[in-house]
Image (tube, rainbow, N blue to C red):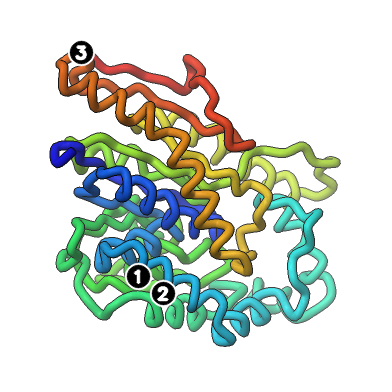
Amino acid sequence: MSSRRITLALGGGGARGVAHLGVAQTLIDAGYVIDRIVGISIGSLAGAMLAFEPDIQKTQSRAVQFLMSPSFRRHQELMFGAAQPTADEGGGLFNWYDKIKHYLRGNRLMYRVATRPGLLPALILQDVTERLLPEADIRDARIPLSIVAIDLRSGQRVILNSGPLRPAVQGSSAIPGIFPPVEYDGMELCDVGVLCSVPAVEARGLSDSVVVAVEVATRITPIRGCSTALDVLMRVDEVGEVLFRRYVRAAADIVIRPDVDHIPWFDFTRPQSLIDAGRRAATRVLRQLDDLFRRRERGLQPRGRTRTAESESGATEPASRADTETAL
């Protein structure tokens, strides 16, 4: 098993990204060696936690304790008032936007939209990273770590392999329009996950090992319609990210999709359930992953990329021709 090395590409999806820690646990317990982590948005946070503390039990415990703490609960109240998400709310960007739109019509958030770089204060992300991550340089991680973001000034995607860890994760997690962008080494960083939520392509370019991508973004669900120009723009953005994600998946050898679509991106109230969902999803692909390594060891699939997808319901589904690519 010592030769079975993998690169984890951890995607964005807000609270659903807590499932990354369950996926990592199952892969580690199965004997796989993580030799690099590439993260976007919440994937950069989960990845950084694991990269600096490879003991997955300690990492999970620290995450759950913080997310259930009074301190973090206050952050959730700041974000969405005292109201908690209900069971019938969807988890997609458009459904979340519909909820926010009602707030915008009735209180001071409209003023923030017009006069500030983000609806929510930077203090939230700063506190999260200070509580969960060390004050360190990215290159000092015990597992090599790469953090993906967008630089608004240059208009380029950036991959951070060195530099201060905490502000890098803050920048990668700064959802455009929601959190203000983060100043970082002359750049202005924000979350690239709204455009491409899975860093499979970046992981493929950074490592020769098997790329295991973990996708926790939502799928497209039907809506009643778009009544305003802003509705149309938001819907097109959501559809565009999902469509682009289908092509990005082909860069990974295995794609794991935990059954977390029903969780709104802002609902961190059930961290252990999310970890368990990640564990179950990873368990379902272990046979395919083992088979992939056996074929490679026998020289039957040199540098191949055969993707196994996890369906939204959690059951393994065969990848379609549009989503699968084998390189010879």
Tell me which label, 3 or 2, sits earlier in the chain.
2
The crowding category of the residue bearing disc 1, from other C-alpha atoms within 10 Å (few below 14, some 14 to 19, many at least 20), is few
Q: Please tell me in which quadrant of the rendered image residue 160 appears.
A: bottom left
User: Residue 193 at what x, y percent from top left?
Assistant: 47, 51
- Pick whichever, 247 or 24, lies toward us: 24
Badge 2 element: helix
Identify the residue at horizontal 24%, vertical 49% (top origin). 34
Q: Which residue is mark 1?
A: 58
Q: Is residue 53 above or below residue 82?
A: above
What's the distance in space between the residues labelled 3 and 2, CA to CA?
42 Å
User: Residue 207 at what x, y percent from top left?
Assistant: 19, 41
User: Residue 309 at what x, y percent from top left?
Assistant: 48, 30
Could you tell whether 247 is left or right of 56 in the image? right
User: Residue 162 at what x, y percent from top left?
Assistant: 18, 64
Q: Which residue is mark 3?
A: 300
Q: Please tell me in which quadrant of the rendered image residue 182 appears.
A: bottom left
Identify the residue at horizontal 70%, vertical 74% (top origin). 80
Q: Which residue is mark 2?
A: 62
Q: Quadrant of the C terminus?
A: top left
Tell me which label, 1 or 3, sits earlier in the chain.
1
What's the distance in space between the residues labelled 1 and 3, CA to CA?
38 Å
Q: Quadrant of the N terminus?
A: top left
Residue type marked 1: Lys
